Image (cartoon, grey):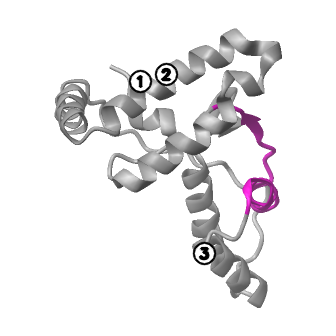
């Protein structure tokens, strides 16, 4: 079963207005007429967006989907696994949170930091380079012990906040 909220990059608690806005923004971004060189690919993307919006944009169908999704996820629950944390490159002595940290934390809390600034912060704090996996919602990947570790934007943001609060 496909998580239709992921098509829009949203949480299951998203309000109707947010779903509508996400659909409109993604429909404009991925409309086949805007990408004549890859019309077939973008037609498939639009079909998926339209399907997700047809269900999530209708209150009755959304309620039915949410119930089916809960049943599906309850049936296919995985055991809790710890989220792998990137190893520190070097151990620095603990420092008091600086004004710079306070400013960065403030900007993170108010969503004033864009994707590339977030990647730069992560690489600076953890000493690991990230690659972007582009899609409807981008994911950020780094290698850890030969395995790829993927983060969403929110997970990346939370890791940075935890690291800044700890230092």
> Mark 3 or 2 closer to N-term?
2
Q: At which x and y percent is residue 157?
A: 61, 59
Which corner quadrant of the image does residue 147 belong to? top right
Q: In what element is the residue under mark 3?
A: loop
Q: Nearer the viewer, mark 1 or mark 3?
A: 1
Tell me the tag on residue 110: 3
Residue 146 visible: yes
Residue 48 in the image: above or below residue 153: above
- The one nearer the camera, 84 or 64, is 64
Q: Name the residue: 50% across, 39% down.
A: 8
Where's residue 128, x and y in %? 78, 47
- Residue for badge 1: 51
Question: Which quadrant: the C terminus?
Answer: bottom right
Compared with 90, 55 (above or below) is: above
Q: Residue furthest front?
A: 33
Left or right placement of residue 138 versus residue 23 in this view: right
Q: Left or right of 12: which side holds 157?
A: right
Please tell me which residue lies in front, 142 or 24.
24
Q: Are marks 1 and 2 in contact (CB under 8 Å)?
A: yes
Q: CA distance from mark 1 to mark 3?
A: 32 Å
**Highlighted range, magenta:** 114-135
> Is residue 121 covered in magenta?
yes
Whole-number angstrom distance, CA of label 1 to CA of label 2: 5 Å
């Amino acid at each position: 079963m496909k998580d239709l909220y992921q098509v829009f990059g949203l949480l299951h608690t998203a309000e109707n207005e947010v779903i509508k806005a996400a659909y409109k923004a993604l429909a404009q971004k991925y409309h086949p007429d805007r990408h004549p060189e890859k019309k077939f690919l973008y037609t498939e993307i639009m079909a998926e967006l339209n399907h997700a919006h047809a269900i999530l944009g209708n209150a009755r169908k959304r309620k039915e989907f949410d119930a089916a999704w809960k049943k599906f996820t309850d049936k296919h629950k995985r055991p809790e696994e710890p989220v792998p944390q990137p190893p520190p490159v070097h151990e620095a002595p603990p420092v008091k949170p600086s004004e710079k940290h306070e400013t960065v934390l403030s900007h993170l809390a108010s969503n004033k930091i864009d994707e590339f600034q977030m990647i730069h912060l992560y690489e600076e704090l953890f000493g690991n380079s990230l690659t972007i996996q582009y899609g409807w919602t981008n994911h950020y990947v780094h290698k850890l012990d030969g395995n790829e570790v993927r983060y969403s934007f929110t997970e990346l943001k939370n890791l940075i906040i935890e690291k800044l609060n700890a230092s």
